[in-house]
Image (tube, rainbow, N blue to C red):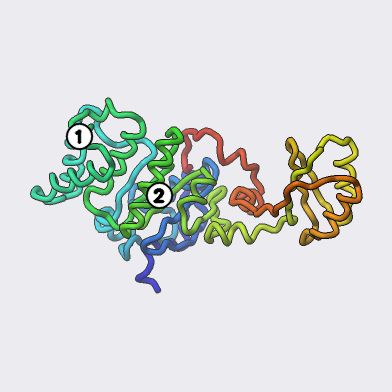
Amino acid sequence: MENDMAIRVEGLVKYYGKLLAVDHIHFQVKKGEVFGFLGPNGAGKTTTIRILCGLSTPSEGRAEVMGFDIQRQTTDVKAQIGVVPESSNLYDELTCLENLLFMGQLYGVAGNQRVKRAEELIQLFRLEGKRDTPFSRLSKGMKRNLTIAAALVHVPPVVFLDEPTSGLDVMNARNLRAMIRHLNQQGVTVFLTTHNIEEANLLCQRIAVIVKGKIIAVDSPEALKKSVERESMVEFAVEDPSPPTLMESIKEFDGVKTVSVKRDRFAVGFKEKPPWESFLAYLRAKGVSVTSINSIQPTLEDAFVKITGLDREIMMMEKEGKKGG
């Protein structure tokens, strides 16, 4: 139903001069879900966020956030959303508390509620020990936490996160993902743009894949994985992987499509469902002792590569400054 949707996008288009950055996209985001916007650099992710947040005007099409039209009711839209840019918009010279109070003032939070909400967010994001520390002296992870906290000061039902873990170390990125899950459990709708495939897989209930301004798939991570048409894969280990004829012997088995080896483990792709018993009998007849064997399920990376035709390395490249990215 329409009132179950936090975001509705219909035929959205954005030109920068002759450059078509967003190309007639359609999608909906359900209330209370983490919705991933996955694509390589320059795909149109940030441009789409800017349009939905009322920071950029679409060339064509329409969109609504929490039932408000992004062009006709921009002020209402901004009251419904929190926006966390990739680069922080907070003030270096202000402390954690002062930044939150200032953002609360900008968002129109009543004076008697402003301090209470700021203190709640400082506790929620575990910044108690840095309450009176200037923003410039915070670690990168704490800066990101405070930037998200500032976007939540007016208790918005929808939060836009643009590459939230970009540049963070493994521990800080893990902590931030846990915080995003916590926000979602509180009922906040999270719109997450990322070029990190594994992050999208961990966090999102549904994912839209955008490439060159076009959305080419929208579904759950599991459904995207299942939709991948690829050969059935098995992985097995053997006692002695060294015989020079072993690789050729595996290739000669009827139905084998691909073979790769890493240390003592072989990954074998079959054209159809793996013929387990006959394959193992074949290996035994060749004098090969198999110590373990299991099937390999397709990953979200596999799905992305198949859907987009792009190399997986493209998604993990260092983010660059871009227009329409």
Query: Viewed as shown, does residue 195 lie left or right of 161?
Result: right
How far is disc 1 from disc 2 in space, using C-alphas?
30 Å
Q: Quadrant of residue 148?
A: top left
Residue ID at (20%, 31%): 95
Q: Residues within 10 Å of mark 1 (few under 14, many from 20)?
A: some
Label 2: element kind: helix
Contact, mark 1 vs mark 2 (Cβ under 8 Å): no
The disc at residue 102 is: none
Give the residue pinned by disc 1. Answer: 131
Q: Residues within 10 Å of mark 2 (few under 14, many from 20)?
A: many
Residue 71 visible? The answer is no
Front disc: 1 or 2:
1
Residue at the outermost bottom position: 1
Residue 158: image location, x then y, percent: 33, 56
Query: Viewed as shown, does residue 93 lie left or right of 29?
Result: left
As rendered, which of 185 and 140 lies closer to the eye?
185
Q: Amino acid at mark 2?
A: Ile
Does label 1 or label 2 sit earlier along the sequence? Answer: 2
Q: Quadrant of residue 102?
A: top left
Residue 113 visible? The answer is yes
Residue ID at (15%, 45%): 105
Label 1: element kind: loop
Residue ID at (60%, 39%): 314
Query: Viewed as shown, does residue 59 lie left or right of 75?
Result: right
Residue ID at (32%, 63%): 66
Give the residue pinned by disc 2. Answer: 49
